[in-house]
Image (cartoon, rainbow, N blue to C red):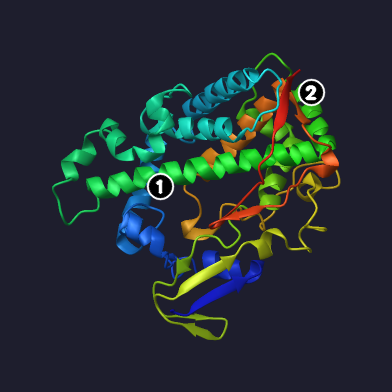
């Protein structure tokens, strides 16, 4: 087994990923992904290929509307569809896993395929296994490049990149949503404060929008605290140094895998007093205003931080506010008996299975 370096604490991780971002921008050893992706795509590629695919991905996402008003319209539409699906549960106990997985997946569909699917659509239900069949929906400029064996814009690379968009843009967001609802069940006082803020700023008649966020500091803090508390990717995806690097009086040889312990940042007790406690106050100042923190590395940091950060933030805010605008969350068991201990699932922390009732307000 090759040696690797583990970085612990905000200062060390910031110095590596931000201050020396170029040198630490490689992708570390990840044998399962290497076999499946063969070095293609954006998540597990490195070097020139990664730079070109990342640049292309950012440009394409912008051209398809990410960061613009029309993508917000799509997320709002999906939020309304999500609410209608939740209504169909008729306030009965349900496991939200499937429905909460459909919404972010459909947002990615609306971006890449320019259409959303009904939640019962057979293609939609199997879409994670059928990326190759759906790739043909994409536009022709890719096809024009596919015969250039020396370029990065090939069908193989496109297929894996689209697969990366679905993998990174669906599972992470749906898991965060699922965990958020569990934490709101566990802490009804937080849920009540968020609903009071929604009633005051948005009301019941119109859909929440991103402009509302700056007027909803408690809700914004709640979303950030969910991401901090659940620590979705405790050790991040592995990085690698792209050249020999002198780092804190150590020489790290080129190609060495770097593990960044994000837990040590998100649970820093000086930045977040009582870090083991779920408390939106971690992101509020004394006046109740939203307080940014450099320690918020839920999307990693530096050159390899999440490409879809802006979209994920939008989805989390709009989906959660729309759900809480329309429903009160009711636990099936006594709140004291709700277990919020994470279950490790590969690289990610996921919530334990649970059921809840969505009570229309």
Q: Quadrant of the C terminus?
A: top right
Would you say 144 lies left or right of 195 here? left
Residue of label 1:
164
Residue 262 appears anywhere in the view: yes
Which residue is depicted at the point 60% across and 18% down?
Answer: 84
In the image, residue 279 above or below residue 200:
below
Query: Seen from this angle, which residue lies furthest top?
Result: 205
Between 59 and 78, the one lying in front of the other is: 78
Q: Position of residue 232 (x, y in %)?
A: 61, 52
The answer to whether residue 299 is left or right of residue 264 is left
Q: Marks 1 and 2, Cα distance to the nearest angstrom?
A: 39 Å
- Residue at 58% x, 21% y is 85
Mark 1, other Cα within 10 Å: few <14 / some 14–19 / many ≥20: some
Of the numbered discs 1 and 2, the one sitting upstream in the chain is: 1
Q: Is residue 64 visible?
A: no
What label does residue 200 carry, if any? 2
> 59 above or below 349?
above
Judging depth in this view, the residue of 311 and 177 nearest the camera is: 177
x then y, percent, for residue 297: 61, 56
Quarter-of-image position of residue 190 = top right
Badge 1 marks a residue whose secondary structure is helix
**Label 2 neighbour load within 10 Å: few <14, some 14-19, many 20+:** few
Snapshot quadrant of residue 122:
top left
In this view, the residue in front, 150 or 349, is 349
Residue 301, by quadrant, is: bottom right
Give the mark toward the camera: 1 or 2: 1
């Amino acid at each position: 087994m090759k040696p690797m370096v583990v970085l612990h604490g905000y200062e060390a991780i910031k110095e590596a990923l931000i201050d020396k971002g170029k040198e630490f921008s490689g992708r570390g050893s990840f044998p399962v992904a290497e076999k499946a992706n063969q070095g293609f795509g954006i998540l597990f590629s490195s070097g020139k290929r990664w730079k070109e695919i990342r640049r292309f991905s950012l440009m394409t996402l912008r051209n398809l509307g990410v960061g613009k008003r029309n993508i917000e319209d799509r997320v709002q539409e999906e939020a309304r569809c999500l609410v209608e699906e939740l209504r169909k549960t008729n306030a009965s106990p349900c496991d939200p896993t499937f429905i909460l997985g459909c919404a972010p997946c459909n947002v990615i569909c609306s971006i890449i395929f320019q259409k959303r699917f009904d939640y019962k659509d057979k293609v939609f239900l199997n879409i994670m296994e059928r990326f190759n069949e759906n790739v043909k929906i994409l536009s022709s400029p890719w096809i024009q490049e596919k015969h250039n064996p020396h370029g990065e814009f090939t069908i193989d690379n496109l297929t894996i990149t689209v697969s990366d968009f679905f993998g990174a843009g669906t599972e992470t967001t749906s898991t965060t949503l699922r965990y958020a609802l569990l934490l709101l069940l566990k802490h009804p006082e937080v849920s009540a404060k968020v609903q009071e803020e929604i009633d005051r700023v948005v009301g019941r008649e119109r859909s929440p929008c991103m402009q509302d966020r700056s007027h909803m500091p408690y809700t914004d803090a709640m979303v950030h605290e969910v991401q901090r508390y659940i620590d979705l990717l405790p050790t991040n995806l592995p990085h690698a140094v792209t050249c020999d690097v002198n780092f804190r009086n150590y020489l790290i040889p080129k190609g060495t895998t770097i593990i960044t312990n994000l837990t040590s940042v998100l649970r820093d007790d000086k930045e977040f007093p009582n870090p083991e406690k779920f408390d939106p106050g971690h992101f509020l100042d004394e006046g109740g205003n939203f307080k940014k923190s450099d320690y918020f590395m839920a999307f990693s940091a530096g050159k390899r931080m999440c490409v879809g950060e802006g979209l994920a933030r939008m989805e989390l805010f709009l989906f959660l506010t729309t759900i809480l605008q329309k429903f009160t969350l009711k636990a099936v068991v006594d709140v004291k008996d709700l277990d919020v201990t994470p279950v490790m699932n590969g690289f990610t922390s996921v919530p334990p299975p649970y059921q809840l009732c969505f009570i229309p307000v």
